[in-house]
Image (spheres, rainbow, N blue to C red):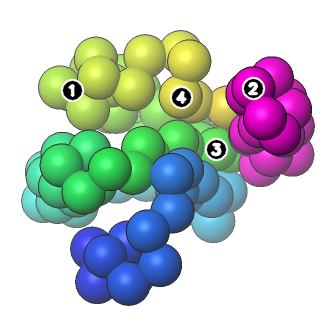
């Protein structure tokens, strides 16, 4: 992910987790580290469509603390709608 973030310089990266039935500890730690790296590179991670088990794991981790409810969405469509609202609200858009 970091190579893509560095190449394309997105402001927001939405991770659609709908196909992820669970998350193991190592993957959670890698996602946590990836989110911190993205922040350093000027991008923000949003999570969408988390199933129950990964949602609980993320909420109870440092990643969940940083994401908060503001960056976790029930659906990908909700994340896109939020992004579009934010874009329209910016001066000069």
Label 1: few (<14), some or many (≥20) within 10 Å? few
Where residue 48 is drawn, which disc sits there?
A: 3
Q: CA distance from mark 4 to mark 1?
A: 14 Å
For label 4, count other residues whose C-alpha is less than 10 Å away and answer few (under 14), some (14-19) or many (20+): some
Q: Which residue is mark 2?
A: 91
Q: Which of the 4 image quarters holds residue 62? A: top left
> Could you tell me which residue is drawn at 48 percent across and 33 percent down?
55
* Point 21% across, 26% down: residue: 61
The first of marks 4 and 1 along the sequence is 1
Secondary element under disc 4, as helix, strand or loop, is helix
> Could you say where residue 11 lies in the image, as x and y percent from the top left?
51, 52
Local crowd size for mark 2, using a 10 Å CA cut-off: few (<14), some (14–19), many (≥20): few
| Badge 3 or badge 1: first in the primary sequence | 3
**Residue, disc 4:** 71
Q: Which secondary structure lies at badge 2?
A: loop
Q: CA distance from mark 1 to mark 2?
A: 35 Å
Q: Earlier in the sequence, mark 1 or mark 2?
A: 1
Of labels 1 and 2, the one closer to you: 2
Q: Secondary structure at mark 1?
A: loop
């Amino acid at each position: 992910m970091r190579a893509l973030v560095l190449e394309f310089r997105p402001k927001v990266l939405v991770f659609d987790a709908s196909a992820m039935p669970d998350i193991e500890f190592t993957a959670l730690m890698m996602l946590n580290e990836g989110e911190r790296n993205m922040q350093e590179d000027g991008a923000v991670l949003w999570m969408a469509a988390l199933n129950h088990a990964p949602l609980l794991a993320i909420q109870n981790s440092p990643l969940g603390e940083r994401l908060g409810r503001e960056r976790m969405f029930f659906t990908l469509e909700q994340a896109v709608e939020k992004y579009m609202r934010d874009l329209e609200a910016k001066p000069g858009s």
